Image (tube, helix red, strand yellow):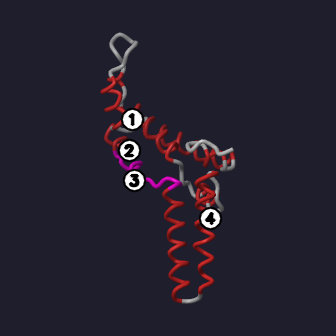
Amino acid sequence: MIPATNQRVELHTCDATNRQIAEQTRERIAFYSTRSPQEVSDRLLELDHEWDIERALECNASALAFSGVVLSATVDKRWLLLPGLVTGFLFQHALQGWCPPLPILRRMGFRTSAEINEERYALKALRGDFERIISRDGVHADAEAAFVGAEQ
C-alpha cells in the first residue's frame, strides 16, 4: 500500500529522528513565544526559504544524475549507471516516501513541508494572525479572514 503523501516521509523515518525534529520545532516555538512580533515575522520569512526534504532530495538527485551524464560523455559510458540508479531511487521515493539518502538528510535536520508548516502556523497563532478569524457569534468564521490569516 502506498502511504499518504503528507505522511510517507515521516513513516519511513526512525522514531528517534522524528522525535528530535519535533522537539527542535517545539523549542523554536517556545523561544519565539517570548519574542517581539517583528522577530516572529523574521522567523516566518526564514521558514519561507527553508528547504524541505523533497527539495533537498530533488536537488541531490538531479546533481548526481547530471554528473553521471557528463562523466559518461567525457570519461566512460559506464557512468550512465549513476543517473539510472539515482532516478530509480527518486521514483522509489515518489511512490513509497523512502530512498537511501532520506535517513541521512532527515538526521541533518531536513523537514517535510508539513513539519515546516506546523511551525509556521504556530508562529502565526503566537503573532495573533488568527484572532480576526473567530466569528462574533462563535459559530461562523469569516471565510475571507480565514484565507488571509492562513496566507500571511
Q: Do the residues labelled 4 and 1 touch (CB within 8 Å)?
A: no
Label 2 belongs to which residue?
44
Label 4 belongs to which residue?
88
Image quadrant of residue 83?
Answer: bottom right
Q: Which of marks 1 and 3 is nearer the N terminus?
A: 3
Q: What element carries label 1?
A: helix
Q: Where is residue 54 in the image (x, y as percent from the top left)?
A: 52, 55
What amino acid is at disc 1? Answer: Lys
Q: Residue at x 52, y 89 (%)?
A: 74
Q: Main secondary structure of the magenta part?
A: helix
Q: Is mark 2 on a helix, strand or loop?
A: helix
Measure how far apart labels 1 and 3 are at the Cα level. Answer: 16 Å
Label 2 environment density (alpha carbons within 10 Å; few <14, some 14–19, many ≥20): some
Q: Which residue is drawn at 34% across and 42% down?
A: 41
Q: Are marks 2 and 1 in contact (CB under 8 Å)?
A: yes
Label 1 belongs to which residue?
124
Measure how far apart labels 4 and 3 are at the Cα level. Answer: 28 Å
Label 3 belongs to which residue?
49
Q: Earlier in the sequence, mark 2 or mark 1?
A: 2
Q: Is mark 3 on a helix, strand or loop?
A: helix
